[in-house]
Structures are given as structure tokens and as C-alpha cells.
Image: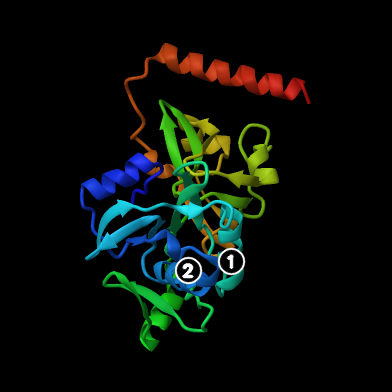
Amino acid sequence: MKHPTSIAEIQNLIDDEIQESLHLDYKDSRALTKKNKDEIIKDVTAFANADGGVIIYGVQEKGYLPVTIDSGVDNSEINREWIDQIISTNTTPPIEGVQILQIPLNKENSVYVILVPKTYRGPHQATDKRYYKRYNFRSCPMDHYEIFDIARRRSKAPRLVSVDVETKGQLFQVVIKNISDLPAHDLSFKFPEGFKWPRGNDFPNAFKDGIKYFPPGRKLSFFYSVGHAVFDKKENIPSEFSIYVSYFHSELGEKTGEDFNINFNEFFGAAIENDTAAELVSAIKSLNHQMGSMARNR
């Protein structure tokens, strides 16, 4: 859900009477103290084991409705680093992707917003060795079958990276995208044995060396060939092949991978026909010039 990032946005939640829910919890500032460490961990793991959500420390509630912003959390007692440390060291296994926002109320006090993602590495155990979930506005102990259901989430973790084909006029491109809200790390690419990339048989650097960090929304396009050359058997350009992509999945906390089938034959007869001959020739000449420059600079 959308989370507040300012005091004004928190006040809007109060003015609009946004009720607590499966994904939202209001807490008095007094709940965020060092003596309440166990209760903090209980609430954070409950959100992760359910469907993720937002905990706002610094708002008084009554009947599950926010009433007012209180005096705030004492900055001399609590800070983001302490919250991050107790969450990371007291949840088993650790919850990846927790975000902690400190919103100043004044020079001495702050409101804290903790964003807890839905887990794919759980279930997560609290400090009392029990498992909790968010249910009916509260953190409740989980039943035995629910623990196993969450353990099976790992097999349903969302894909972070996609590989597909795009056409630009008569030009074919292999496109890699991060289609998630999470970064992917340490991408590597494996092609079939003996596969050769067209035009010099030299793979693009990303395919050869991998990608260290691939942020959300990033898209990389690699020219493969002109359409008519792919369909011309004499050119001997592979028209169908697979790419195995592996990467570190931050929600799983481990490497994962997937095979993507690339089939240019699906585009036979479907290329855009509005391109004039001059535009196509110009595009090919420009591409040949770039490739020639790269070859001379080696």
C-alpha cells in the first residue's frame, strides 16, 4: 500500500479516517522503546508472514481509527540504526527489504514509518520462538498449516527479470528488463553450446561479463539482426534459441534462474510494413557504420 512520507500525509490519514487493516497499523510512540523490543519484532514478523504492510509509530488510535499524532519518539533514545539492528538480528530468518522512514516532528522527536514486505523466505519467527500473522487488526499466533503454507511461498516468488524480443521496423532486438519493484543482483547469461551471436560472433559485454546490479525498471536492448537476414537460411543466423538467466533474488535470499526461449520465427510476416525503403537502408547503413567503428577500435 502507499505509505506516508511526511507529517502532512500522516495527518491526511487521520483526517480521512483511514482505518487500521491487514496492511496498516497505528502505534503510540511509547510502543517504540527498547523495553518493547519483543513486541516490535512480533508486529514486524506478523506483517511479513501475512501480506506485508506499514506500521506507523507516533499515532494514537481508538477503535482502530487514527485520532492524533502524539508527541513523537525521542530522537536521543531511538534512531533508524537501532530499529534496523533489532529487526535484522531478532527475526529468524532475517526479513529482507524492510524500510525504515524517520519523519521529524520537531528537533527532539520523530514519527517512524516501517515498511514490511511480504515474505518469500519465511515463515519468520519472533523472539519468543513463535510465529505470528496479521489478522483482524492484530498480530496473532499462526496455526500449524499456515506455517507450512508460508514455507511454500518460496516456489511462488515473483520473477524479477524478463527476456524477450522487440522489433524496431525491420530490426530485431533481444531485450532484458527488470519487471519488478526489487533490484536483481549478479545476473549471468548462458547460451546453448556452440551458439554464435550475429555480426562478428562477439557477444555484447552484458552477456559475456554479466550485470552486477540491475535496478527496477531498467531495460537493456541488444541489436540481433535485420529481419530478412534471420529468415534467410543462407545467412546461417539462429532464429530460435534459449537463454538461461540466473541472478540473486533479494526476497528469496538466494540465486534463482529461468530459461527464456527466443523465437524470431514468430515474427515472420509480422514486421512493420510502413517503413520506407529509404528508412530501412538508412538504419542498416548506420548500424554497419557503428559495427565497423567498433571493429577498428579493437
Does residue 196 appear in the picture of this structure?
no
Circles 2 and 1: CB distance less than 8 Å?
Answer: yes
Say which element carries label 1. Answer: helix
On the rendered structure, is 21 left or right of 291? left
Amino acid of disc 2: Ile
Say which element carries label 2. Answer: helix
| As drawn, 136 above or below 195 | below
Q: Nearer the viewer, residue 288 or 33?
A: 33
On the rendered structure, is 263 left or right of 207? left
Q: Nearer the viewer, residue 112 or 286?
A: 112
Q: The C terminus lies in which quarter of the figure?
A: top right
Q: Position of residue 36 (x, y in %)?
A: 50, 71
Q: Residue at the spot x=55%, y=72% of the render? A: 91
Q: Which residue is mark 1?
A: 86
Q: Which residue is mark 2?
A: 40
Work out whether mark 2 precedes mark 1 in sequence or the reverse, and give the earlier one.
2
Q: Position of residue 219 (x, y in %)?
A: 50, 38
